[in-house]
Image: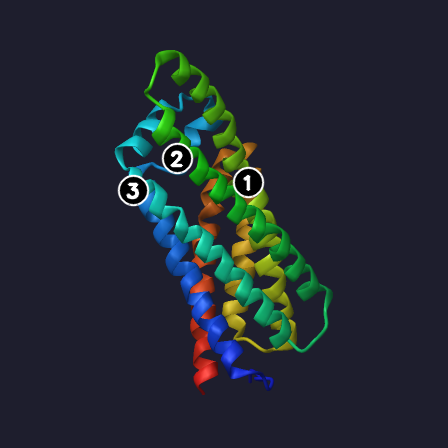
Amino acid sequence: MISNPPFNKNLLRMAGIAGILVGVLILTFAIVSDLNKIFFYDAIYRGGSVDPWLQNVLASPSLSRFITVLPVLGFSCMLIVTIVLYQYIPENSWQKNLALTGHAIGVPVAVGSFIAQLSLMNEALLLYGKSAEMDVQFQLITSVRLHFFHVVNHIFGPFFIIILGTTMMAWAALKASVLPRWICIWLITCGVMMFISFFGFLIPVLRLVDIGAPLHMLGCSMLGLILLRRSLA
């Protein structure tokens, strides 16, 4: 039987809505940006030209700018959920302290990287295609900045946000029996999958388990539904 500790229902409601938005906003961003090839550009790891990415941004200027807002809002909502859950879990454990630390580091960095990416896209819309000489220099700069963005969002962000943040918070909630066991196991499994995916650089087949990232966002939305339902009980 899951115990429900007395808690401010308004905070639970806020965390519930925020949790739902995490999945909705970030998954929408991931799907739309992938379909239009305007954000994640994995060819950068293989030394490919950044011109295709630049052309995609130039082809969809309004979408390129708007889509950046979604992960910024989504990750901000994730921090709200973490802060509320930290208080909702009565047991003082190193797991929930580490989780709060992970999200406190990872979320601002992830948000900052998306804002920096928005700045890069604005620069591309203003400067790229003006002259051949400037285009060569801009491609060089863009290549470096895209590589940095990918490192943050494929390694740094998942490590602090999913592995240290969500996984540890789910572990703390499981120990304290304040959330359904299945959602805790779901989120912990996502963290394990993301950790394994880090070794995909050595064993390419392991990259398949980075599906843990979208599953994590889906899990955040399901967690939000659980918290929202409890706030209305």
Going from N to C along the chain, the mark reached first, 3 or 1, is 3
Circle 1 or circle 2, nearest the eye: 2
Is 90 placed left or right of 194 in the picture?
right
Out of 187 and 15, give the one closest to the viewer.
15
Q: What residue type is labelled 1?
A: Val
Image-quadrant location for residue 181 = bottom right
Count the marks. Answer: 3
Sequence-wise, which precedes: disc 1 or disc 2? 2
Crowd tier of the residue under label 2, counting other residues whose Cα lies within 10 Å: few below 14, some 14–19, many 20 or above: some
> Which residue corresponds to mark 2?
122
Identified at 61% across, 77% down, the residue is 177
Q: CA–CA distance between discs 3 and 1?
A: 24 Å
Return the residue nearer the eye: 221 or 187.
Answer: 221
**How many residues crowd mark 3 within 10 Å: few (<14), some (14–19), many (20+)?**
few
Q: Nearer the viewer, mark 3 or mark 1?
A: 3
Q: Is mark 2 on a helix, strand or loop?
A: helix
Q: What label does residue 62 carry, if any?
A: 3
Q: Is mark 1 on a helix, strand or loop?
A: helix
Is 150 left, or right, of 159 in this rendering?
left
Asked if 49 appears above or below 99 in the picture, the reply is above
Residue identifier under label 1: 152
Q: Please tell me which residue is depicted at 45% across the width and 37% down the height of the picture.
A: 119
